[in-house]
């Protein structure tokens, strides 16, 4: 059985889509090619017209009817047009999450400098039409900073990664109407500089057979090899049979839409329509069609015909699409810090306020939303109270919300303390910290009788993160870092003693001179002098400096305690004692810290 | 900082006026004690016509004695100081019968006022070395005031109970900020007042550190010509008002 040939009207429409780095639609262009293909092997067609009517409205075609003229055997006539569309029939969404291990509503968008970033790439394609989409091929360029590429899952199709070309190809799948397919990739991202990186582009091509972006509904009108004629035959005297005969001489299927025959009366007058048919019949090649009527006439009837026919056509259509998604920019987050003491060193055994300033600088290329500074104070340092901290952002004092916790929550200088400063959600207060900007905190501590033989490290750990928070950027000092310097100041407590005769018999006046001749304040000074057996303490001048008296085996002890003596401080004490015998001299003992 | 007016005890308040540098006047019940009316770079801090009953210079330097002689002569006030200061005042015209030499730890008393001097020291920046500077423990009415003058050492003041402690903070031969703060921490006065600062950073730091580490001491930085009134409300509640 020979093939039934119909003229082919072909609508091949294409859409070209461009997406931004966040998969947002930035551009969609659609165009089409309308072609008329004469598939005949022996019959040309002519007076070819393509009737579009109102269906052309979504296009830039100006005329309701396109004149294609004559199309030879096997020939083709084409017309290009543009189509107005708002969205593609296939949508692509790429989620490039630099920290796939941490579940967040929005993906992480920056690499952490110098660390292994657990990257998760999710590619989702969605069929937005009521027809199937197939021949989908997705190509993803994998950026050089990613390694350990693994296909985690594919909802359909086959995904393969070629390490040599750094290309990932996902293909051999179709998507049913209004459904999606998804590909998930994992990788390890390592960056060793802070230049903004590229996440790699994505290109998708697809084909939708039987679909169109325009609403064009073209109809063909044409002529081809088609024989027609009227046979008039007298069947009885003065009785005639008139037959309209049509024959499809082409190898195309021809549809006869209208057949009319008019008879001119013998005596003149208006023509009479004798055949009026709209058969809509499709005539196969070499097939005939006829229609007849009888009329009485003395002479041969005079008939004329009006025929409308056209080769039949069939409509073929498809949409070919492509999506190009731009490469997402992936910045890098990194911080550096500085910590300073003012003064950098304190005198030993003294109480000195020390200003502590810690500055954390954004030295990466990503915005930072939160910071934590953990400062560790050694013992012999009194911490501040938690309201005594000053915070600057971009060198301007920051008064927004933050947390400053001192653990333990006291000012005991004999304990070590951990000071934790934390500020979050800067995006909602003064805005995130941009690259090059910094956050600075300052508070005062009191170095409390620092000992010269001891070391006072005050290590610090600074942390920052983006929004949403992923792996934290951490920078720490060594555990023995940031030592508070201690300047050794010599201690020198001198005691001098004189034993003088008093006014009365057996009365002696013991003069003690205690002086701090050193370079540093002495604290908890204790001076002990001895009163021989047989003698008793009477009084002290000045009275405020009366000692504590305690009994010893061979006499008694006088003990003076002073909390503090500054360099140059001197105390002169006159103690009156009374008794019998020789007043033996022993040197006073002194101790201090 | 202010406190509400009280109806009891207000007549017994001590009014402390700051003139700048180390010059203060303590006024209580018609008695005015003027402290260190010094001359700094040729400029007097307290006007010559200031009326006081007692004028005290804690050492013989010009920045302590200043125009004390003129004020004393004009207002017929007593001049008190250590031997060096008294000699200098005498040379400047203070009548001998109005001079009183203070001895360390020997109180000087008049009605409502008891002044106990303690021998401290300051650095003599012109001659070098140390010279005596008296620290004053002033019991005036019901208020106890410690005034260290130009001291570089603290002496017994860390053991004295004080409502108000006035300390130098400039570090120019006297306490630097850290020592002034340290004394406040140890002595725990109710109010700490800095004086004799080299730059405005000094009193600000003093205030900041005392507030943080003073464990109850309230730092008050006074501007020249500002007055601080302190009193015991109802006899047992310490109050103050800075004008």
Image (cartoon, rainbow, N blue to C red):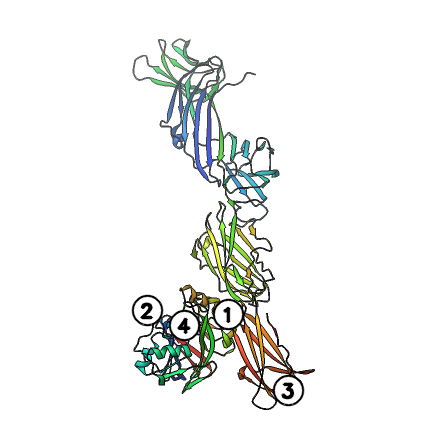
Q: Residue at x 32, y 79 (%)?
A: B93
Q: Nearer the viewer, residue A210 or B66?
A: B66
> Residue B227, labelled with which disc?
none
Write down the quadrant of residue B101 in the picture. Answer: bottom left
Query: Callout 1: helix, strand or loop?
Result: helix
Side of B52 where B121 appears, left or right? right
Query: Callout 2: helix, strand or loop?
Result: loop
Q: Nearer the viewer, residue A547 or A209?
A: A547
> Residue A535, labelled with which disc?
3
Give the class, few, some or many, for how many residues have Cα within 10 Å of label 2's Cα (few <14, many ≥20).
few
The quadrant of the image that shows the C terminus of chain B is bottom left
Label 4 resides on the chain identified as: B
Q: Is residue B16 visible?
A: no
Q: Which residue is mark 1?
A: B182
Label 1 resides on the chain identified as: B
Q: Which residue is mark 4?
A: B1
Q: Which residue is mark 2?
A: B42
Tell me where residue A223 appears, x and y as whole percent. Answer: 41, 17
């Amino acid at each position: 059985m020979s093939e039934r040939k119909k003229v082919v009207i072909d609508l091949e429409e294409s859409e070209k889509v461009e997406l931004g780095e966040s998969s947002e639609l930035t551009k969609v262009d659609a165009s089409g090619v309308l072609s008329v293909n004469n598939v005949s092997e022996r019959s040309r067609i002519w007076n070819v017209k393509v009737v579009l009517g109102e269906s052309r409205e979504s296009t830039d075609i100006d005329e309701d009817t396109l004149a294609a003229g004559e199309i030879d055997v096997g020939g083709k006539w084409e017309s290009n047009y543009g189509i107005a569309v708002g969205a593609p029939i296939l949508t692509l969404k790429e989620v490039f999450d630099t920290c796939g291990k941490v579940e967040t509503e929005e993906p992480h968008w920056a690499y952490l400098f110098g660390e292994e970033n657990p990257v998760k790439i999710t590619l989702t394609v969605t069929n937005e039409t009521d027809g199937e989409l197939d021949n989908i091929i997705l190509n993803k360029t994998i950026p050089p900073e990613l390694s350990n590429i693994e296909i985690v899952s594919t909802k359909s199709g086959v995904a393969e990664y070629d390490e040599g070309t750094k290309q990932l190809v996902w293909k051999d799948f179709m998507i049913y109407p209004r459904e999606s397919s998804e590909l998930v990739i994992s990788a390890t991202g390592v960056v060793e500089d802070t230049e903004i990186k590229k996440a790699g582009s994505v290109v998708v091509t697809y084909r939708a057979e039987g679909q169109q972006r325009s609403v064009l509904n073209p109809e063909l009108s044409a002529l081809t090899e088609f024989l027609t004629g009227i046979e008039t035959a007298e069947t009885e005297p003065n009785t005639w049979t008139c037959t309209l005969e049509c024959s499809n001489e082409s190898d195309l299927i021809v549809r006869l839409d209208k057949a009319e025959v008019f008879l001119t009366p013998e005596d003149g007058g208006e023509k009479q329509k004798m055949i009026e048919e709209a058969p809509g019949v499709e005539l196969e090649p070499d097939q005939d069609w006829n229609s007849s009527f009888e009329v009485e006439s003395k002479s041969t009837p005079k008939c004329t015909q009006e025929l409308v026919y056209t080769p039949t056509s069939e409509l073929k259509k498809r949409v070919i699409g492509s999506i190009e998604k731009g490469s997402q920019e992936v910045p890098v987050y990194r911080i550096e810090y500085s910590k300073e003491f003012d003064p950098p060193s304190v005198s030993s055994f003294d109480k000195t306020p020390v200003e502590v300033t810690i500055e954390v600088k954004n030295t990466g290329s990503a915005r930072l939303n939160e910071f934590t500074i953990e400062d560790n104070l050694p013992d012999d340092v009194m911490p501040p109270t938690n309201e005594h901290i000053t915070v600057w952002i971009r060198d301007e004092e920051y008064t927004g919300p933050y947390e400053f916790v001192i653990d333990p929550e006291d000012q005991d200088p004999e304990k070590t303390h951990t000071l934790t400063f934390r500020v979050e959600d800067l995006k909602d207060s003064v805005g995130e910290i941009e690259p090059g900007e910094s956050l600075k905190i300052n508070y005062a501590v009191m170095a409390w009788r620092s000992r010269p033989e001891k070391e006072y490290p005050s290590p610090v750990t600074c942390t920052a993160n983006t929004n949403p928070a992923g792996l934290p950027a951490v920078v720490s000092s060594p555990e023995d870092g940031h030592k508070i310097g201690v300047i050794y100041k010599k201690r020198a407590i001198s005691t001098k003693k004189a034993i003088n005769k008093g006014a009365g018999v057996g009365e002696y006046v013991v003069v003690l001179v205690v002086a701090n001749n050193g370079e540093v304040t002495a604290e908890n000074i204790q001076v002990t002098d001895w009163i021989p057996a047989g003698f008793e303490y009477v009084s002290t001048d000045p009275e405020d400096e009366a000692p504590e008296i305690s009994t010893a085996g061979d006499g008694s002890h006088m003990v003076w305690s002073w909390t503090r003596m500054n360099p140059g401080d001197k105390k002169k004490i006159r103690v009156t004692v009374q008794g019998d015998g020789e007043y033996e001299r022993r040197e006073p003992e002194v101790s201090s810290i | 900082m202010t406190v509400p007016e009280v109806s009891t005890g207000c007549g017994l308040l001590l009014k402390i006026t700051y003139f700048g540098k180390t010059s203060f006047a303590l006024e209580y019940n018609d008695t005015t004690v003027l402290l260190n009316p010094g001359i700094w770079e040729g400029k007097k801090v307290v006007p010559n016509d200031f009326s006081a009953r007692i004028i005290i210079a804690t050492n013989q330097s010009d920045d302590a004695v200043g125009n004390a002689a003129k004020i004393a002569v004009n207002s017929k006030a007593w001049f008190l100081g250590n031997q060096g200061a008294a000699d200098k005042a005498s040379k400047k015209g203070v009548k001998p019968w109005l001079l009183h030499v203070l001895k360390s730890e020997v109180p000087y008393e008049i009605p409502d006022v008891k002044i106990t001097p303690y021998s401290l020291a300051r650095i003599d920046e012109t001659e070098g070395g140390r010279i005596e500077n008296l620290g004053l423990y002033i019991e005036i009415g019901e208020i106890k005031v410690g005034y260290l003058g130009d001291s570089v050492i603290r002496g017994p003041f860390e053991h004295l109970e004080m409502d108000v402690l006035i300390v130098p903070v400039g570090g120019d031969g006297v306490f630097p900020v850290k020592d002034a703060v340290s004394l406040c921490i140890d002595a725990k006065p109710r109010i700490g007042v800095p004086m004799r600062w080299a730059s405005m950073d000094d009193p600000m730091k003093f205030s900041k550190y005392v507030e943080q580490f003073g464990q109850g001491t309230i730092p008050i930085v006074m501007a020249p010509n500002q007055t601080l009134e302190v009193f015991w409300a109802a006899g047992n509640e310490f109050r103050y008002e800075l004008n």
